[in-house]
Amino acid sequence: MGVRVAVAGASGYAGGELLRLVAAHPDLEVVAVTAHANAGQSLGAVHPNLRSLAHLVFGETSPETLADADLIFLALPHGASADLAAHLPQSVKIVDLGSDHRLADEAAHSRYYGGDYHQPWTYGLPELAGQRTEITAAQRVANTGCHAVAAILPIAPLVAAGLVEPADVVVTSASGTSGAGRSALVNLLGSEVMGDLSGYKVGAHRHVPEIKQASGVTSLTFVPVLAPMPRGILSTVAVRPVAGATEVDARAALVAAYADEPFVYLLDAGQQPHTSATAGSNSAHLQVVTDQDSGRFVLTCTIDNLGKGAAGQALQNANLMLGLDETAGLSANGVSP
């Protein structure tokens, strides 16, 4: 018998990936899975890849269904987590993969999300300075957004080191279609996506205030792009160095920030990150170069949006909250080809 965990919203892509990881975890046991439209169906009918959990049946998403767990993962749409969490016992640890409790700035929440504002929980990015200690002590953790973590990891160390202008940052972030969820939408049909690239929510994406909050950036141009692949994110960050800062300085700041991290890797000079190299893993691959024309630092970062961008990140946070090995159930190795 391991630590008893439940997953609310387990029929979606992030929920399914979370179950895949938990099923292989040496210290966790799945005791409940819930869904909305799929309630009453077997897990194997919705996630046929999860053979070891195929016998489980999706219950209704309610406090009663989840009450027997020691830790609960909430993989629910925006606006659904806060109300459910408010009716769960304070003794139960929660990792929210949604956005309800990420933002400390109520005005930013109103501008980018709208609806009711909820107080922020501990932010779930262990690689940020001091954050691992806070996560370890927390009962409630707000997981990162997928685009957000792929932007924050390359930016934050350079801002903290005073090497770049925090008011002059441009991010272009290309994401696989699973980042949009599992709903049957016309713009996500294979015939619409294959052979195509398109921007979406350009100029007002919801991850903008989260990136600013966690990275120290004060002004951000953010361009999300839908890419014709199931999973993965490639984030390209262009920043203006302060006078005298060099690429050597930028690289040294990234090394200092991540040298001892189990899942964040600064690649050798000349090697660019690939989304395929992080697929199925909890890793982030980084690189920094100097643009020869503009003089900007150009940082690139790849993650699996369902891994380090969602389920893998959530499990990493849960391990810390439960006092387990932070890397348990997680792999730094991608699946290729």
Image: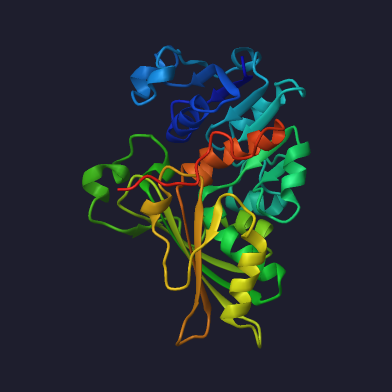
Q: Quadrant of the N terminus?
A: top right
Is residue 179 visible to the viewer in this orientation of the structure?
yes
317 relative to 282 in the view: left or right: right
The spot of residue 184 in percent (x, y) is: 33, 34
Along the line of sight, the residue nearer the viewer: 331 or 132: 331
Q: How far across and how far down the image is residue 37, in percent? A: 42, 21
Q: Is residue 219 left or right of residue 290?
A: right
- Residue 211, position in %: x, y? 61, 58
Residue drawn at x 63%, y 12% as measured from the top left = 64
Left/right of residue 292 with respect to residue 115 in the rendered view: left
* Residue at (58, 67) in percent of width and height: 220
The residue at 39%/35% (across/down) is 182
Image height of 328 relative to 262, above or below: above
Residue toward you, 115 or 41:
41
In the rendered image, residue 313, in percent from the top left (x then y), is placed at 57, 42
Q: Is residue 137 above or below residue 8?
A: below
Q: How is the image coloured?
A: rainbow
Q: Is residue 156 left or right of residue 89?
A: left
